[in-house]
Amino acid sequence: PFDVKLASSGQVLRVPAGRTVIQVLAEQGIDVPYSCEEGVCGTCLTRVLDGVPDHRDLYLTEEEQAANDQFTPCCSRAKTSLLVLDI
Ligand code: FES
């Protein structure tokens, strides 16, 4: 599990194993646009302001993944205990 923090509201949400960031956000009424849910299309791409994503997508290049400033919340997770999202 890890937490995501929404930069705009300061809200912190727990993302348990087996749930995606997209699902956890949707439960709070925060809808991130998505399509494939498999890390292929890039529709859900979200800016990361702090923390290190655990990239599980096939959309970003290795360089883009290494920059740690965006991730695909439909499938990617976190290597750090907290990710701050530009939402
Ligand atoms: Fe397609 Fe996330 S919905 S990459």
Image (spheres, grey):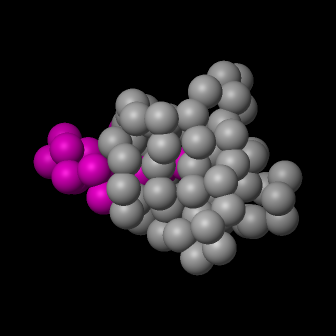
**Residue that protrudes farthest toward the bottom in the picture:** 8
Residue 80, image quadrant: top left
Residue 72 visible from this viewpoint: yes
Q: Is residue 41 left or right of residue 19?
A: left
Q: Is residue 48 left or right of residue 44?
A: left
Residue 59 in magenta stretch? yes
Where residue 61 sits in the image (x, y, percent)?
22, 47
Total count of labels: 0
Instruction: Using the image, determine if residue 67 lies above or below residue 76.
Output: below
For the residue pair 43 and 66, the one nearer the viewer reads as 66
Which quadrant does the N terminus fall into? top right
Where residue 27 sits in the image (x, y, percent)?
84, 52
Q: Residue at x 53, y 70 (%)?
A: 7
Where residue 59 sits in the image (x, y, percent)?
36, 47
> Which range is magenta?
58-74
Instruction: Using the image, determine if residue 75 lies above or below residue 31.
Output: above
Which quadrant does the C terminus fall into? bottom right
Q: Residue at x 26, y 45 (%)?
A: 65
For the residue pair 45 and 15, the one nearer the viewer reads as 15
**Residue that protrudes farthest toward the left in the picture:** 63
Residue 36 visible from this viewpoint: no
Q: Is residue 80 left or right of residue 75?
A: left
Q: Residue at x 36, y 56 (%)?
A: 50
Where residue 33 sits in the image (x, y, percent)?
65, 65
Q: Residue at x 67, y 62 (%)?
A: 11
For the residue pair 56 and 19, the one nearer the viewer reads as 19
Residue 73 in magenta stretch? yes
